[in-house]
Image (tube, grey):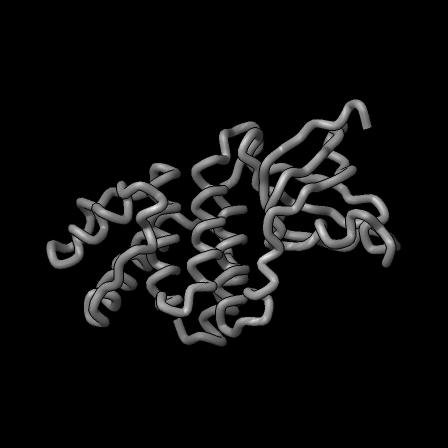
């Protein structure tokens, strides 16, 4: 335990390994996307049971290994349990996690993507916000953080909105709404941009399209 390092992060995915373990992928503020094994996390009385699930956010105590970290403890800030019971919010949520994982790289500062993903999941829990708009804000800002987007590629009708999403303080991202026709134009524009930069299958996007129709 003395060799453990602390990371602020979020669990992006969790897969069973063997009889009792889990393989986790986390987005961390300090080291970007990392892999960690949670030994015994599937045992009913494991202290790692609750912390070894997607969406869990907090401080994780990890011991570095040759190819991956070992999770030895966690102080959970948020489980997003309300989101797990929300349809279609849960589908949007898993899509956000997969997209964050797509862009994540080990050894890079993950602060921007971690903050964006956390606030976007919180926005999905806000009944006053349209999940479709939350999705488009998340996608555009994620591309902008990673240098894959310029607002000047947008048509004049939505260019101001795109500029705002790309550059606004992150705490202001989910403080506005748009008219339905603007949202439709924004969605088409972002879909075109994503088709140029995403180079592999995003399974959660297909599921989202199937169940939500986007």
Q: Give me the residue at 78% from left, 53% from top.
A: 49
Q: Give me the residue at 54% from left, 60% from top.
A: 94
Give the image quarter of residue 69: top right
Residue 119 x, y percent position in the rendering: 44, 50
Query: In the image shown, does 22 or 7 lie closer to the viewer?
Result: 7
User: Does the rendering let one see residue 66?
Assistant: no
Residue 152 x, y percent position in the rendering: 17, 45
Quadrant assignment for the N terminus = top right
Residue 182 x, y percent position in the rendering: 20, 65
Q: Give me the residue at 54% from left, 71% from top.
A: 86
Q: In this view, does 71 lie to the left or right of 160?
A: right
Query: In the image shown, does 104 or 78 lie closer to the viewer?
Result: 78
Most distant residue in the left direction: 156
Give the image quarter of residue 185: bottom left
Q: In this view, does 144 lie to the left or right of 5?
A: left
User: Does the rendering let one see residue 18?
Assistant: yes
Residue 89 x, y percent position in the rendering: 49, 68
Q: Give me the residue at 53% from left, 53% from top.
A: 98
Quadrant assignment for the C terminus = bottom left
Q: Is residue 207 left or right of residue 156?
A: right
Q: Is residue 163 depicted above or below 195 in this figure?
A: above
Most distant residue in the top direction: 3
Q: Is residue 62 depicted above or below 143 in this figure?
A: above
Numbered label tally: 0
């Amino acid at each position: 335990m003395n060799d453990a390092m602390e990371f602020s992060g979020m669990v992006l995915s969790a897969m069973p390994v063997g009889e009792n373990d889990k393989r986790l992928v986390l987005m961390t503020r300090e080291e970007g996307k990392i892999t960690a094994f949670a030994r015994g996390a599937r045992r009913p009385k494991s202290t790692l049971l609750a912390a070894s699930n997607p969406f869990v956010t907090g401080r994780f105590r990890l011991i570095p290994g040759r190819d991956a970290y070992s999770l030895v403890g966690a102080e959970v800030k948020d489980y997003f349990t309300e989101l797990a019971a929300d349809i279609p919010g849960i589908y949007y949520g898993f899509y956000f996690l997969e997209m964050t994982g797509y862009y994540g790289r080990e050894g890079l500062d993950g602060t921007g993507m971690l903050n964006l993903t956390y606030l976007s999941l919180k926005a999905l829990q806000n009944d006053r916000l349209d999940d479709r708009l939350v999705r488009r804000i998340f996608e555009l800002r994620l591309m902008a953080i990673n240098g894959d987007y310029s607002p000047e590629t947008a048509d004049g009708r939505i260019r101001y909105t795109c500029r705002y999403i790309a550059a606004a303080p992150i705490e202001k991202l989910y403080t506005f709404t748009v008219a339905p026709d603007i949202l439709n134009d924004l969605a088409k524009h972002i879909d075109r941009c994503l088709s140029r930069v995403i180079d592999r299958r995003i399974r959660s996007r297909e599921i989202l399209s199937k169940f939500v129709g986007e």
